[in-house]
Image (cartoon, rainbow, N blue to C red):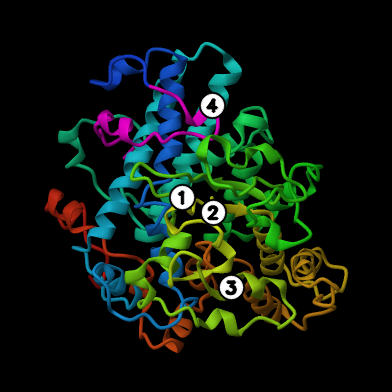
Amino acid sequence: MKKIIKFSLIAISILIFSGCSDFLDLKPEGNLGTTGTFYRNTKDIEYALTASYADLQSKAMYREYMVLMTDVRSDDLGSFANSGANAGREYSIKIFTAQSDNQIFREVWASTYETIYRCNNVVKYIDVVNDNDLKKQYEAEAKFIRALCYFNIVRFWGDAPLILEPLSTQEVAQCSRDAATSIYGAIEADLKFASDAGNLPTSFKGEQLGRATSLAAKALLGKVYLQQKKWNDAKTVLGELINIDNAAIHGLLPDIANVFSTAPAPGSSNADYNNYNGWSPQTMNKEILFQVLFNKDISGEGRNALTYYTSQADLNEAFKLSNPIECIYNPADRRADLMRSIKGTNSDNKLIVKYADIESSIKQYGYHTPVLRWADVLLMYAEALNEVAYDGSATSPALKALNEVRTRSLANGSYTIDKLSNQDSFRKAVFLERRLEFPMEMQRWFDLIRSGDAISAIGKIGYNIDSHDFLYPVPYSEVSLRNDANKFPQNPGY
């Protein structure tokens, strides 16, 4: 079903935060009352696109709940006590007892589809943009964000409405759940369009930093293929990305700490980006392909989930930061320093060093949320190559990609692997490296599902699950709206 939910455009006005660059600091022009009368010129399209980027900052998306529904769900956090005023809903997600009436699911579903709504309107009304280059760019950016949203939807819920064009509110109730395979097909189509360098540039500079690029789209397409176990497709697209002569644009920073540093790092695209118009101090650097930008939100707080779930008082008891992930690092691994628990200067709440600026107030944390990093590209490529055909040679491209990430983690480079005996040992080495490289970056839960290790890994931390737990329950509000179990069934087991 290629349709779109019609949400109120009025909500846009409260979602545009003060921006770090021109593309995040637009003001509406024209009538917000109806969709048809709003999209009249290029500025209207720019405003809708800006709103799509801003939506990603919401609590229901990358500011909080994406981390809850991925990292908190996984085995990367330690004991989780059911305490604190707001811990109940989060706690039920952690221990796999959450049901369809959990408000978090409703908020994530609604917010994600609202972002899809904005993107779809950009695509539908793109012809009001007269400049052909801008027209292609804006359409590609909208399709990138739409693909990212649908990728989250399909990984969380499986079958879901595939909504790609305008639909009245009354028609929304007639939507059925489309097959996950159809959703993945739409995601792939959007990302193929966005990854075309003729539609999106390979990079942006200055005040345009933070926009989606063709290279980010190619990386996300590789991740989409990988999650579906389309190994050959993933190998091809990630190989193209790695073999592009883009060393000046993307690559690993020599020290991983600089990826999350508040100071301009070697390889920073724009040192002046730090503290621009009140945005967070974290720098843009060549390792980041795409990240969600954060500053102080409309409530005056700049935190996102990367600090919220490790710093808020009511969850400090819930998330015990003496977590398993701290115990599996090589003592000389520099990444271990980023995962140690510390106390902030303005409270007794514990933080994870990776996302903590201990010189700042708790309420002014505003770290950008990495969505795609170059280390991810390398490890995805290694995984795809190994799944296509194991190569045990010391000079294999897969081993080279794996070792590039491993070597960066130790100053003396002694962490390299000369040989892995078989395909399974290589597979395990890749997933271990991913766990060490990406804690609190919304990767682990999906990695556990793809690797087939979710049931055993979660069992080791005390929770017995089965395959139905790989998907969340569809929000009760969505099921009851249709009231038709054939057209809009609940996921099995809920």
Mark 1 vs 2: CB contact within 8 A = yes
Q: Position of residue 366 (x, y in %)?
A: 49, 51
Query: Quarter of the image containing the N terminus?
Result: top left
Q: CA distance from mark 2 to mark 4?
A: 30 Å
**Does the segment drawn in magenta span residue 405?**
no
Note whether residue 381 is visible. Answer: no
* Residue appearing at x 40%, y 20% in the figure: 125
Kindly indicate the quadrant of the structure image that contains residue 208: top right
Circles 3 and 2 in contact, beta carbons < 8 Å: no
Name the disc covering residue 184, or none: 1
Q: Amino acid at mark 4?
A: Asp
Q: Residue at x 38, y 53 (%)?
A: 153
Secondary structure beneath dot 1 equals: helix
Q: Which residues are magenta?
A: 1-27
Q: Earlier in the sequence, mark 1 or mark 3?
A: 1
Kindly identify the amino acid type of the residue bearing the numbered disc 2: Val
Element assignment for label 4: helix
Question: Is 11 contained in the magenta span?
Answer: yes
Q: Main secondary structure of the magenta part?
A: loop
Indicate which label's residue lies in the foreground, 2 or 4: 4
The residue that label 4 is drawn on is: 22
Where does label 3 land, which residue?
339
